[in-house]
Image (cartoon, rainbow, N blue to C red):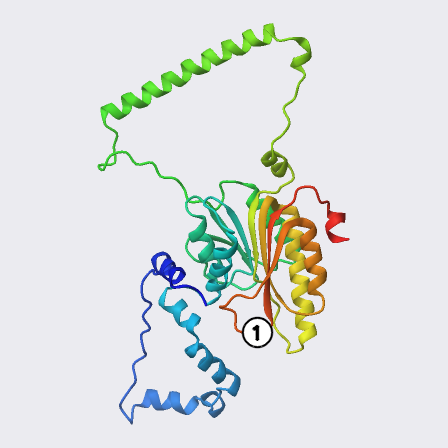
């Protein structure tokens, strides 16, 4: 089970305040015409619509430790504890990172990502269904399998400023600059101008005395520049995507494999060298082939079943760490 330290960290980070449920008023007048009219128009089928499966689900949620903790700590769902546990183990997040959360609704993973990448991080969530995003999360609604939606996500993350919190510069408590502040700013500006002028003069002198053979030397691009030139600017990709379950194990497994492959293709196009990828899948016969592809693109690949994942569930997670630079698309997806 998760340690008390993780729950304490969650309490410090996510306890935004209690959510109060306001119960509807109950009319006690037995002869109230408006209420009796509503009672008459309510079909018996609706009043007795609670199926045995929904009753079991409600009972399970009420008795579930992680579901209760999620409600207490203001988290969108119990799934947050899965990501917290895996991040505690594999150190996925750092401040300032760009994170893409595929299938983000209801938003618990995005909540964790926003908290762990602060300050100056950005989280972009994509989901087919409309959902209220957690504070600090940018979202795109659409089917991720659509090439148009994927192109929109790529274009969004290419701009390094989109989705990041804006920096606010404050001076004094009264909101204005003092004379000393203005003088210091002017002095700094003058020093910068003087230094720029000296640098320009020095560059002219060096160019005049530099041997001809060194003028043509070109500095090799850095790792970051090489990644940016290929559109690889994302630090972490999370995929919690799953199709609606059918009750047919192989069909559900095959559907989850298709979504994982789509997420892996997105990683190949957008994830920077050294970046991480985590995806949920339904266990089955095809997971080994997916793991093989992951190992071609990433330095380390771990198969995980978090403590907060229900033991009866067939879900599991691949955590792929440190994307390699060299593998080509043909190498990975052959």
> In the image, 180: left or right of 98?
left
Q: Residue at x 69, y 60 (%)?
A: 290
Residues packed near mark 1 inside 10 Å, few (<14), some (14 to 19) or many (20 plus): few
- On screen, 108 above or below 249? above
Residue 128: image x %, image y %? 57, 62
The quarter holding residue 141 reads bottom right
Residue at far bottom of view: 31
- On screen, 239 above or below 152? below
Q: Nearer the viewer, residue 305 or 173?
A: 305
Residue 133: image x %, image y %? 46, 58
Q: Nearer the viewer, residue 129 or 119?
A: 119
- On screen, 81 above or below 274? below
- On screen, 139 above or below 119? below
Q: Nearer the viewer, residue 152 or 121?
A: 121
Which residue is disc 1 drawn over?
313
Residue 149: image x %, image y %? 61, 54
């Amino acid at each position: 089970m998760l340690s008390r330290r993780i729950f304490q960290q969650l309490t410090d980070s996510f306890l935004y305040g209690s959510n109060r449920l306001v119960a509807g008023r109950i009319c006690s007048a037995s002869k109230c015409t408006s209420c009796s009219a509503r009672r008459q128009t309510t079909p018996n089928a609706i009043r007795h619509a609670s199926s045995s499966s929904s009753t079991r689900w409600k009972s399970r949620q009420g008795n579930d430790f992680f579901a209760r903790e999620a409600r207490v700590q203001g988290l969108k769902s119990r799934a947050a504890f899965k990501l917290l546990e895996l991040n505690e183990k594999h150190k996925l997040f750092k401040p300032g990172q760009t994170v893409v959360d595929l299938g983000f609704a209801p938003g618990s993973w995005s909540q964790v990502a926003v908290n762990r990448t602060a300050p100056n991080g950005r989280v972009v969530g994509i989901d087919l269904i409309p959902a209220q995003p957690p504070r600090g999360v940018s979202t795109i609604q659409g089917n991720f399998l659509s090439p148009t939606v994927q192109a929109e996500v790529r274009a969004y993350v290419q701009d390094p400023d989109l989705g990041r919190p804006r920096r606010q510069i404050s001076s004094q408590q009264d909101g204005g600059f003092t004379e000393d502040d203005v003088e210091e700013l002017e002095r700094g500006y003058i020093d910068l101008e003087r230094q720029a002028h000296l640098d320009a003069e020095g560059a002219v002198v060096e160019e005049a005395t530099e041997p001809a053979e060194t003028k043509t030397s070109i500095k090799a691009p850095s790792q970051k520049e090489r990644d940016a030139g290929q559109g690889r600017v994302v630090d972490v990709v999370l995929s919690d995507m799953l199709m609606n379950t059918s009750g047919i194990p192989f069909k559900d497994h095959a559907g989850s494999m298709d979504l994982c492959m789509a997420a892996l293709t997105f990683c190949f196009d957008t994830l920077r060298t050294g970046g991480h990828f985590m995806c949920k899948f339904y266990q089955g016969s095809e997971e080994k082939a997916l793991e093989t592809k992951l190992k071609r693109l990433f330095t380390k690949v771990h198969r995980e079943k978090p403590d907060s994942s229900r033991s009866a569930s067939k879900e599991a997670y691949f955590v792929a760490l440190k994307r390699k630079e060299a593998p080509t698309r043909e190498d990975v997806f052959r």
